[in-house]
Image (cartoon, rainbow, N blue to C red):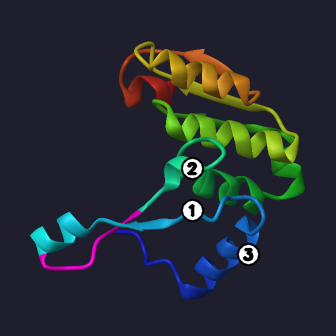
Amino acid sequence: MSELVSAAAIRAAADRLRGVVVRTPLLPVPWLGEELGAEVRLKCENLQRAGAFKIRGAYNAVASLTDEERARGVIAYSSGNHAQGVALAAQLFGVRAVVVMPTTAPRVKVEGARALGAEVVLEGTTSVERQTR
C-alpha cells in the first residue's frame, strides 16, 4: 500500500504549478446539491490548456526530474488526456515526449498530443500492451 502524500509535498507541487496551470472556477450545481443534501460544486478542469486536469500531475512529474533526467526526455502511456498533459509539460520544458497510445484512442486525443509536440506511438488496445512497448 502506498503512503499518504504529505502536506509539504502538496505545497511543493502547488508552488511548481503556480503560473503554469489555469486557476479554474468552481461552479455551484444547486439541483444536485438539493438531491444530495449537500453543497455541490464542479471544478471546471476542462478549461486547462490541455483540456483536462492531467497537466497538473504531468507537469509536476516533469518538474520534479533532475536536469539530467529531463534532458533525456519523457515517455508515458495513456489513452488520451494524460498523453496531452505529458506532451504539454514536455513542450513547456523544451524536452522530447513520447506517448504510447492504444490503436483505439480517439483521433482527437492522438492529434492533440501530436499538436503539443509529442511523438505518438500507437500500440495495442490495453494498458499492458502499451506499457510493455
As for residue 18 lying within the magenta part, the answer is no
Question: Which residue is at 61% across, 57% downward?
Answer: 56
Counting residues from the start of the chain, the first of labels 1 and 3 encountered is 3
Question: Which residue is at 57% across, 62% downward?
Answer: 24
According to the image, label 2 marks what residue?
47
Q: Residues within 10 Å of mark 2 (few under 14, many from 20)?
A: some
Front position among marks 1 and 3? 1
User: Please, what is the three-letter code of the amino acid marked with disc 2?
Assistant: Leu
User: Please, what is the three-letter code of the amino acid marked with disc 3?
Assistant: Asp
Residue 24 disc label: 1
According to the image, label 3 marks what residue?
15
Residue closer to the observer: 68 or 105: 105
Instruction: Check the image and report above or below for 53 versus 42.
Output: above
User: Please, what is the three-letter code of the amino acid marked with disc 1?
Assistant: Thr
Q: Position of residue 80 (x, y in %)?
A: 50, 31
Front position among marks 2 and 3? 2
Q: Residues within 10 Å of mark 1 (few under 14, many from 20)?
A: some
Image quarter (top left, top right, bottom left or bottom right) of the N terminus: bottom left
Residue that lies at the very extreme toward the bottom in this rendered image: 7
Q: Residues within 10 Å of mark 3 (few under 14, many from 20)?
A: few
Image quarter (top left, top right, bottom left or bottom right) of the C terminus: top right
Quadrant of res 43: bottom left
Quadrant of res 114: top right
- Which stretch appears magenta? 37-42
Label 2 secondary element:
helix
Locate residue 86 relative to residue 117 in the image: left or right: left
Residue closer to the observer: 85 or 130: 85
As for residue 41 lying within the magenta part, the answer is yes
- Do callouts 2 and 3 mark residues in contact (Cβ within 8 Å)? no
- Do callouts 2 and 1 mark residues in contact (Cβ within 8 Å)? yes
The answer for how far apart the CA atoms under marks 1 and 3 are is 16 Å
Instruction: Check the image and report above or below for 42 versus 12.
Output: above
